[in-house]
Amino acid sequence: MVRKILADNKLVGVVPQKSPKDGDPYFKQLYKYGVLGQLQRMVEGPAEQKAVLTLGLKRFKIVEEISDSPFLLAKVEYLDEIYPKENDYDFLTIIESVRDISRKILELIGKDTIQAIDAIQNIDDPEFLINLL
C-alpha cells in the first residue's frame, strides 16, 4: 500500500498507536490526534525493516470513525498550528534531539539511508524538520 501511495502522490493521515505491539491497530488502539502527511520516500533495511519519510502538512483530530476496511477511514477536524516563541531555547534543544534520534534510527536501518540522513542534518528550518519527520 505504501508503494502505491508514493507512486500516486496521495495524502494520508498518520496517527500514532497507543501501543507499538498492535500489528494492525483499529481506532480504539490509536490516539485521536494525527497529521495529514505526504509520503516522501520509503527506505528498506535488513530483516524487512522499513522507514517512511513523511512530510506533515496539517494537524488534525479524529472526530468520526467511518470505516475500518480495507484501511482506516475517518472524518477529521483540522487544528490551528501552535508556534514557539522566536529563539526558544527549549524548543531548539528538542529540535536537535529529534534530529539526532532520527539520524540514529536511519543508521540502524542502514541500507540506502545516507541521503535521508544528509537531508535531515541539513534542514535549517525547525518547522520543516518537524513536519518532515
Image: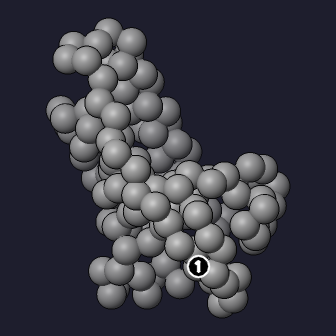
Residue in front for this viewpoint, 46 or 127: 127
**Which residue is under mark 1?**
73
Percent across and percent down for residue 8 are: 33, 87
Secondary structure at badge 1 equals strand
In the displayed structure, does residue 89 sit left or right of residue 111? left
Crowding at dot 1, Cα within 10 Å, few <14 / some 14-19 / many 20+, comes out as: some
In the displayed structure, does residue 87 sit left or right of residue 111? left
Percent across and percent down for residue 42 are: 43, 67
Q: Is residue 3 in view from this perspective?
A: yes
Residue in front for this viewpoint, 45 or 73: 73
Residue type pointed to by label 1: Leu
Percent across and percent down for residue 81 are: 32, 42
| Above or below, 59 relative to 120 | below
What residue appears at the point 76 percent right and 70 percent down from the top-left corner?
A: 26
Residue in front for this viewpoint, 76 or 57: 76
What residue appears at the point 66 percent right and 90 percent down from the top-left corner?
A: 70
Tally of numbered discs? 1
| Above or below, 33 relative to 71 | above
